[in-house]
Image: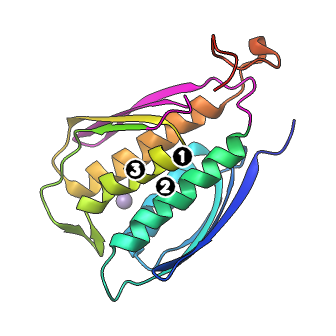
Amino acid sequence: MEQRIATITRTTKETDITATINLDGSGKSNIDTGIGFFDHMLDGFARHGLFDLELTCKGDLHVDSHHTIEDCGIVLGEAIKKAVGDKKAIKRYGNFILPMDETLILCAIDLSGRPYFVSDVQYTVPKIGELDTEMINDFFYAISYSAAMNLHFKQLAGVNNHHIAEGSFKAFAKALDMATMHEERLGEAVWSTKGVL
Ligand SMILES: [Mn+2]
């Protein structure tokens, strides 16, 4: 099987980011975004999706966290898109309902080639550690657009904001792992009536 590894580097006046993802990894990660809680979330994403992920970001955190988090989403989405490649023989759809104590988060993905993002996940505090909670949906929105995926989140339950955030990143990891898995019965085919995704 071809290696499904991709590296993306993106440099602007606001951020300098390099990300490498291996879709067929073992959950190893090396993350440094300058935002501790965000690193914790991306570490959980790699571990629970069994992706290997290296991501470093030098962002303008003296302004605020907006550029760093949004741009990390853009770059991670581009890396996922490149690593998935021609989408031959992948399951395409993935979903997971992830419990974390009182929290329950549903994530559903279609690697359709068409970006669309829907989420009703809500936070009741402005910050978790140094992460601005309003940026979490912006992060996933950026991924859905740059990876050209349809991405849905439903918050089925949740009180603790740390759990809601972590449940979302882990549910996304599990759903993406499922969507990127190979389906042997497809042979070399792409799972679409159109023949391409
Ligand atoms: Mn945690």
In the image, residue 72 lies at what x, y percent? 49, 64
> Residue at position x 40%, y 76% from top?
35
Does 96 lie within the magenta span? Answer: yes
Residue 96 as seen in the image, left or right of residue 167: right
In the image, residue 82 lies at what x, y percent? 69, 48
Span shown in magenta? 86-115
Among the 4 quarters of the image, the one containing residue 7: bottom right
Q: Which residue is mark 3?
A: 140
The C terminus: image quadrant: top right
Secondary element type, mark 1: helix
Q: Residue furthest left?
A: 124
Query: What's under tag 3, amino acid-wise?
Result: Phe
For label 1, count other residues whose C-alpha is less than 10 Å away and answer few (under 14), some (14-19) or many (20+): many
> Residue at position x 19%, y 53% from top?
160
Residue 140 as seen in the image, left or right of residue 78: left
Q: Which mark is residue 48?
A: 1
For label 3, count other residues whose C-alpha is less than 10 Å away and answer few (under 14), some (14-19) or many (20+): many
Q: Which residue is mark 2?
A: 44
Point out the frontmost of discs 3 and 1: 3
Among the 4 quarters of the image, the one containing residue 8: bottom right
Query: What's under tag 2, amino acid-wise?
Result: Gly
Query: What's under tag 1, amino acid-wise?
Result: His
Q: CA distance from mark 3 to mark 1?
A: 17 Å
Secondary element type, mark 2: helix
Q: Which mark is residue 12?
A: none
Q: Is mark 2 within 8 Å of ligand 1?
A: yes
